[in-house]
């Protein structure tokens, strides 16, 4: 039996009206505290348009977190690959892997917010295919070897080769998954881990029993393997001395998040 591990996924949600500088400092303090508590991983991702999730570069945030921590692994949860040239993503990840002394986990996604894609002028229908394509290129760059060229409809490489390879010999890749099978299928294709973000919803929880089969089926088709120990299930927690006290302490913040962000922001983004 494998030991269960624990980590923290921070979007992070900063309610509009709170001072962003103080919030970012608080986020870094939190990572440092989680490291002291002995948690295994910390994840944060990028968002660009809702006003609530103000980290535009998880690599930049995690570089600061790496200087404050010692053992906790640091995951990009996630880099939205369709919004970036894959070569530039690969270079930033390599630098972060060295700065964190090999504690980086590379999590990627297609971009969760329609408003981000709209702002950047990217067709939402091409996001998942672009993530798939970029993952393959980044893995090839990480492996080193000969220079190669590549051209598609959204980026081009001429005799590409990284100046520096990751500190980790085989950096772990992870893919964000919601309710549909697309994330799991992509993880299987690339032999990547999974970050099940949709499990915070009723539909997401109901979908979990079937999710892993999609990853295994896809892995088999592409000559890859997937390992359940690399499957992260994201859930919301508030811990207190009793259930009633936890509900009382979390109530105000949860209602504000649900009413202002989930309903008021995401529904109109």
Image (cartoon, rainbow, N blue to C red):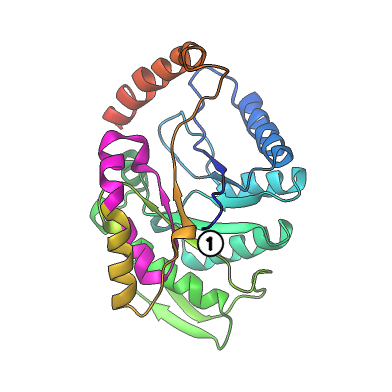
Segment tinted magenta in the rendering: 183-209
Specify whether residue 198 is painted magenta.
Answer: yes
Q: Residue at x 27, y 29 (%)?
A: 267
Between 104 and 41, the residue placed more toward the observer is 41
Q: Is residue 153 visible?
A: no
Q: Is residue 224 visible?
A: yes
Left or right: 46 in relation to 130:
right
Q: Residue furthest front?
A: 1
Q: Please identify the dominant SS of the magenta region.
A: helix
Image position, residue 21 (x, y; %): 64, 27
Q: Which residue is mark 1?
A: 89
Mark 1 secondary-structure assignment? helix
Q: Is residue 211 above or below residue 18?
A: below
The C terminus - image quarter: top left
Between 226 and 182, the residue placed more toward the observer is 226
The number of callouts visible is: 1
Q: Residue at x 73, y 60 (%)?
A: 101
Q: Residue at x 63, y 44 (%)?
A: 61
Q: Is residue 253 above or below residue 9?
A: above
Image position, residue 156 (x, y; %): 42, 73
Quarter location, residue 25: top right
Q: Is residue 52 above or below residue 89?
A: above
């Amino acid at each position: 039996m494998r030991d269960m591990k624990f980590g923290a996924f921070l979007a992070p949600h900063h309610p509009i009206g709170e001072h962003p500088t103080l919030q970012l400092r608080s986020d870094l303090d939190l990572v440092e505290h989680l490291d002291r508590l002995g948690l295994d991983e910390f994840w944060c991702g990028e968002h660009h348009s809702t006003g609530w999730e103000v980290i535009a570069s998880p690599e930049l945030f995690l570089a600061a977190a790496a200087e404050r921590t010692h053992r906790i692994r640091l995951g990009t949860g996630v880099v939205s690959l369709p919004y970036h040239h894959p070569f530039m993503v690969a270079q930033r990840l390599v630098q972060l892997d060295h700065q964190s002394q090999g504690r980086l986990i590379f999590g990627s996604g297609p971009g969760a917010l329609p408003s981000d894609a709209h702002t950047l002028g990217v067709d939402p229908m091409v996001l998942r295919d672009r993530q798939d394509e970029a993952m393959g290129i980044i893995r090839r760059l990480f492996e080193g070897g000969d220079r190669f060229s590549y051209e598609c409809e959204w980026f081009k490489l001429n005799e590409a080769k990284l100046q520096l390879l990751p500190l980790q010999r085989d950096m772990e890749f992870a893919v964000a998954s919601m309710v549909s099978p697309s994330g799991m299928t992509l993880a299987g294709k690339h032999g990547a881990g999974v970050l099940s973000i949709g499990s915070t919803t009723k539909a997401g929880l109901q979908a979990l029993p079937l999710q892993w089969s999609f990853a295994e089926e896809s892995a088999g088709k592409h000559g890859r393997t997937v390992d359940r120990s690399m499957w992260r299930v994201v859930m919301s927690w508030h811990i207190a001395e009793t259930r009633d006290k936890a509900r009382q302490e979390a109530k105000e913040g949860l209602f504000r998040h649900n009413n202002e962000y989930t309903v008021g922001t995401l529904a109109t983004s």
